[in-house]
Image (tube, helix red, strand yellow):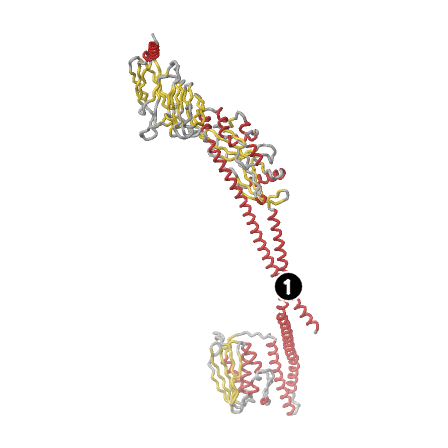
Amino acid sequence: MNSPAQAKKRSVVRFRTKLVAAMMLVVSALTALGLYFTQRKVATTAERDLQENFQAEVVSLHKVLALRQTALTERCGQLVSKPRIHAALEDNALDLLYPSAKDELQDLMEGQELSQAKGASSLHARFYRFLDATGAILSPPNPKDVGELSTEAMAHLALKKLPEVQQIGYVSEGGDAAGGAVDEVMAVPIFSTETGELISALVVGFKPLEIVGGAGLKSGIWVNGRLHLPSLAKPAQLALSDEIASAITKSDRVQNNFNVTISGAPQLLFYKLLNPESVFPPAYEICVYPLTESVAQQRRLRWQIGGAGALLLLGGFMVSNFMARRLSVPVEKLAIDSERNRAALASTSEKLKRSTRYSADASHQLKSPVTVLRAGLETLLRCEDFRPEVYEELSALLHQTHRLSGVIDDLLLLSRMDAGHLQIESEPVNLSQLVDEWLDDLSALPDSPEFRIEKKLPVGLHVAGEKRYTSLIVQNLLENARKYNRPGGRIRVSAHENANHVVLTIGNTGRPIADAEQQHIFERFHRGSIRSAVSGHGLGLNLARQLARLHGGEIRLVQSADDWTEFETCFRVAQPAPNRAS
Amino acid sequence: MGLRGLLFFNAIFALLPITVFADAVVEGHVELPKSHSAPVMAKRYEIVTIGGVLSPQPPLAVVYLDGSFPKSTTTATKQIAQKDLAFLPSLLPVQVGTRVEFPNLDDTYHSIFSYSPAKRFDVGRYRPDERPIPSEVFDMPGLVTLRCDIHEHMRGLILVLNTPYFVVTNPEGRFRLGGLPSGHYALKAWIDSKTTREQPVDLKADTVLHVDFP
């Protein structure tokens, strides 16, 4: 008794553990999902903020650049409309070109020393040159007056064709592969006021604007495969230059941004083509924005989210545990009840099986000795040397063996039904004919009391069932009607079809069944006390009802009072088979 | 012969070449290019540039007798004024050695200069009341483009000629050039900076020769 209780306890504990595990799984999944979405939202927000900050910085930088370029453009535009420059070019006085320009561009070139010292914030030019109609540089008489240039820069300045519109370019001063000086160059076309033709161009070089903006934004120029970002160390410039080169080669976008690492620190790099469709080599503005703070902030946030997640999980675990305990109480009770019910059911079923097996075995075991007994008695009866009273006794004994055989047959049939082994092979059975045959047999029986038979039966009434069992039902009911009748009484047999059923009613005169007994008459081995004088073994009605039910029908006692007892049997109706009228 | 007689001689002597050569007259018509603007009562002439050709607008021509003539011993003085931000006249033919003054009749600064091969000069910025009036002597024949350093649209032309015999046609192209010496010459009509037409002429004393430049 101890072991099943422990097993039950173990199984309840198992159930509780499983419940906790399942709840934890759900809590964990929800927490993970929540964390994932929070993390994603945080990352998106951080990215957006970063982009906004960065864009704001870049936009302000571009505003400064645009303002400066507008100023430069205007200034250069004014310069090339100077009458002396036009006069020198148009009146074939090239020797006067640079001297005239020197006067005109004096203010532009003035203070260039100062501008270099101050950085590139001023609009002072570092150099200027004129190009002839073929795009070649018109050599100045004194390069010092117009700003000296390296050979490399000169080579970049000379153009294959004069530009028709103002152009912006960037020209390397030469020097190292990275970090060398670069000049922002504005080429302004000069059209002859006389012919309207493009006769020359003024190329003015400025120190490019380099801004170290807020939040550590640095800007520089990338041109001819070189990066000029003086605020970066040379090795970093070299490494970055290659990255930019590959990014620009891969993408045909005029502007883009990507993440880079400079000296171990993550940075956002932005590039933008400065001079689209220019006669000068393409130059890109490069902005580098440090991500260190953003990354640190994201890491902090990730830790915070992780911590919050852990707390949530812990809370979830505690709540799950508590809930599991609460929830498992009724389930535990249910489990225990169910276990009990299952055990009871198994025990009942086992008992039933045992009982059925016992009945079957007993019946089989009894049948052989009874047969032997009957055979012995019949042999004795055939002897002629007994006294007449011995014959009577032998006859009585033989009759008892017949009864015993009947009981054994009924018991066998019942046990087969209880075991569920009885299979019905349904076929149309002519009920009318069956009743007629049994009524004939009934009246032919030797010890039958005098009674009258009233029959009200349609001809050819067919029911569905196996003939011998249907016959057994009818036999049992008619036998009872005969057995429990009174002398001079009557038996009434009637039948009618009702929807899908055929109802057979058999009534007989005689002492009615007492009210208290009526509910027990279908029980096995029940025999009314008043009927002890009547032969029988108390199995007939039970057997008939079991068989009727097996055929999808029913037997019930309709009435038993005032000298009249009536049973009603339901059969399933069957269409008569055309060739089997029997 | 006193001072009076000397003066008379001098006067005779001075007029002598004129009286000797001032016989022939050439008159005619120059077919001027079509005006680019609608014919209006144009009072001012401007120098315009079309396809790299400088020409007065409305069209005018300078007709002159080409040849080798003795230089003037005196320096003649002519004027090109700046009025209403334009040169007036916009086209001035002068004989080599003529001084041209550039009076400023506007109430703003002007700065007249030229980078033309025939004459490079730069009078610099000057006010209307600048005295003496800025001037230049044009001692090489050729076309001189006048510009103002302050007003880039301003253009003026001075046609410096070797000859003292020249005249500007009227707007219809008619001209009359008198007092010409007898002889065989080339009569030229300057129409614009790229176009000068030429007709050979035989000039006889007391004769009026009719020459048209088609």
Which chain is mark 1 on? A
Quadrant of the drawing holding the N terminus of chain A: bottom right
Secondary structure of the residue carrying tag 1 is: helix
Farthest residue to the right: give it. Answer: A2
State the residue in front, A308 or A338: A308
Residue A301 to residue A281: above or below? below
Task: Residue A194: name its quadrant.
Answer: top left
Which residue is painted at 32% across and 25% down in the image?
B171
Farthest residue to the left: give it. Answer: B207
Is any part of residue A215 visible from this angle? yes
Residue A201 placement (x, y as % from top left): 48, 30
Q: Which residue is mark 1?
A: A318
B175 sits to left or right of A68: left
Is any part of residue B182 visible from this angle? no
Residue B81 placement (x, y as % from top left): 38, 26
Task: Residue B36: name its quadrant.
Answer: top left
State the residue in front, A59 or A471: A59
Residue A404 placement (x, y as % from top left): 62, 84
State the residue in front, B186 or B129: B129
Which residue is painted at 63% across and 42% down in the image?
A263
Task: Residue A420: name its quadrant.
Answer: bottom right
How many residues crowd around disc 1 within 10 Å: few (fewer than 14), some, or many (20 or more)?
Answer: some
State the residue in front, A417 or B22: B22
- The kind of residue on which mark 1 rests is Met
